[in-house]
Amino acid sequence: MFMLPQKDSGTPTTSPGSLSTQGLHSNHGDGLEREGSGKPDQKPLKLYGVGDPTAMFSSDSPYLSSRGSIIKWFWDSAEEGYRTYHMDEYEDENPSGIINLGTSENKLCFDLLSRRLSQSDMLRVEPSLLQYPDWRGHLFLREEVARFLSFYCRSPAPLKPENVVVLNGCASLFSALATVLCEVGEAFLIPAPYYGAITQHVYLYGNVRLVCVYLDSEVTGLETRPFQLTVEKLEMALEGANSEGVKVKGLILINPQNPLGDVYSPGELQEYLKFAKRHELHVMVDEVYMLSVFEESVGYHSVLSLERLPDPQRTHVMWATSKDFGMSGLRFGTLYTENQDVATAVSSLCRYHGLSGLVQYQMAQLLRDRDWINQVYLPENHARLKAAHTYVSEELRALGIPFVSRGAGFFIWVDLRKYLPAATFEEEKLLWRRFLDNKVLLSFGQAFECKEPGWFRLVFSDKTHRLRLGMQRVRRVLEGKSQVAEDAPSC
Ligand SMILES: Cc1ncc(COP(=O)(O)O)c(C=O)c1O
C-alpha cells in the first residue's frame, strides 16, 4: 500500500474544462508505484510540470478505492467556479446572477442549430440503429466523417472510413488514446499554457502524465509572436523529462490552440511532426476548433492537409462537434488514424464511450448537409464570432489591456499582470475571486499551467446582452469599483 499525501483543498478553477494543476509538480511517485511494482527512486520534476495528481490529495472516503478517491478529488477540486456559476446563473429572471465568460462554449448559434436539428430528416428509427453497433461507429457515419474531413481539412487524397473511429467527444478520445499508447506513468509533452482538463483526461483511466513545454509572452525577434512554440523548446522539455527518468511517449498539439487561439502554419506543423518522428513520439493533434477560425486572413491548415505526414503511423487526429458546431452537450467526437492497431484498440474502448445509433444517424445527416453548413451555418457562425470578438477586443483596448488573439476559437488570452499587486499565483487567484464575487466568471492562467501569473482566458462567444454585462463587471473590478446591484437596469 502507498501513502496518499495531504490534500490541498482550496484550489479554485474556472470552467468545467479548466483544471488547476497547481501543486502537481511536487511529484510523490508515479502510477507504477500504485500498481504495486515496487517504489522507483523518482525525483520530483520541477522544471517541466510533470504532474502526479496523488501529490495533492488525501483519501477521505471509506467507500472508494485509492483510484476512486483520486477521481473524486478531481471532481471536487476542479470545478469550484463552474459549480458556483450553476448555483447562481445569470438569467432574465436573475439579472444579478453570474455571467460565464469562463467556459469555452459557443452560444451564438442555438437558433440555427435547433432549426436544423428539428427537421424531419433528422430522426430515423430502424432496427440496426437500436441494436449493438459496430463499436467503431456505423459504417454510414464513418463514411460521412471521412468525406467531411477530406473536404474541410483539404486532404490531398480522400480520407478512408476504415481510419475513422467515432465516440462521445474529444475528452474521451484523449482518455482512450492515452490508455492505448502509454504504459502507466508514461507521459506526453504538451505546450503550456494548454486546456487544463487534458491533465485529467489522460490521467483518470490511463494514469498518463503531462510534461509541459513552457511558452512565455516575451517576443524575442521580428518574426516571433508571444507564446510561440519552437522545436528548440520541444527538444529542451523532452531532454529534461528524459534526464528525470520520465518516459515520454508522445506530443499533444492543439490547433487552433486553447487558450492562446494560436494557429500553426504548415511549416511549423511539419517541424513539430518531424521532431516527433526523430524521437519516435506519437502526435495527438486536437483540431476541435478547426472550423472556428473566423478571421479570414488567418490561413488555417489541418494536419490532414499536409502532402506527406512525416510519420503517419504515429499521427492521430481528433475532431468533435462540441466547438465547431456549438453542441458541447451532444457528445460526438472522431479519431482519424492510419494506424490500424491504434484504431482497433480505441474502438475496443468505444464500448464504454460509444454513441447511440439515433445520434449517429443524426450526425451523419448533419455532416452530409454541405449546403446548410457552407451557406448558412459557417458564414453566420463566423460573422457572429467575429462581431463578438470585435466587441470584446475593443473593450479591452479601451481599458488599455494587452491581449493575445489571432481570430480563432472562442477566447481571448488577456494580460492582467498590471492588476496584480505582486506577480504571484495567489494574487492571480484573488483577482479571479474578485471577478467571481462581482458575478463574472473568467478562467485564470494557472488553470492552463501558464508560468506567468496574471493571464486570464476570456470567452467571448456569447450573446450580446450577456457579453456587455460581463464586460461591464470586468471593467468595474479592474477599475476598483465593485458592485453588482446596479447592473440590472443597464442590460
Ligand atoms: C482543445 C480542447 N480539446 C478538447 C475539448 C473537449 O472536447 P469535447 O467536449 O468534445 O469532449 C475541449 C473543451 O473545451 C478543448 O478546448
Image (spheres, grey):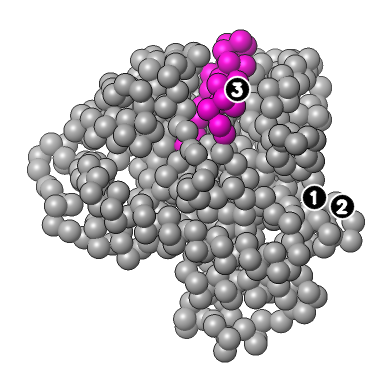
For this rendering, which residue is in front, 192 or 389? 389
Question: Amino acid type of disc 2?
Answer: Ala
Horizontal side of residue 261 vs 285, given as left or right: right
Which amino acid lies under the numbered mark 1 shown in the image of this protein?
Pro
Q: Is residue 450 above or below residue 278?
A: below
State the image quarter where residue 2 is shown: top right
Question: Is 322 located above or below residue 212 in the figure?
Answer: below
Q: Quadrant of the C terminus?
A: bottom right
Query: What is the spatial separation of the Cα atoms under label 3 and label 2, in whole angstroms?
Result: 32 Å
In the picture, the disc for residue 423 is 2
The type of residue carrying mark 3 is Tyr
Q: Residue at x 60, y 22 (%)?
A: 272
179 shown above or below 63? above
Tag 2–tag 1 contact (CB < 8 Å): yes
Horizontal side of residue 258 vs 484, given as left or right: left
Earlier sequence position, callout 3 versus callout 2 = 3
Q: What residue sits 39% from the left and 33% below the top?
A: 153
Q: Tell me what residue is drawn at x 75 percent, y 16 percent.
A: 239
Give the number of the mark in front: 3 or 2. 3
Report helix, strand or loop for mark 1: loop
Q: Residue furthest right?
A: 422
Q: Which mark is first along the chain, 1 or 2?
A: 2
Q: Name the mark nearer the viewer: 1 or 3.
A: 3
Mark on residue 272?
Answer: 3
Identified at 35% across, 19% down, the residue is 344
Which residue in the protein does label 1 denote? 453
Q: Secondary structure at mark 3?
A: helix
Whether the residue under disc 1 has CB within 8 Å of ligand 1: no
Is 410 placed left or right of 66 in the picture?
left
Q: Residues within 10 Å of mark 1 (few under 14, many from 20)?
A: many
> Magenta residues?
264-288
Res 30 seen here: no
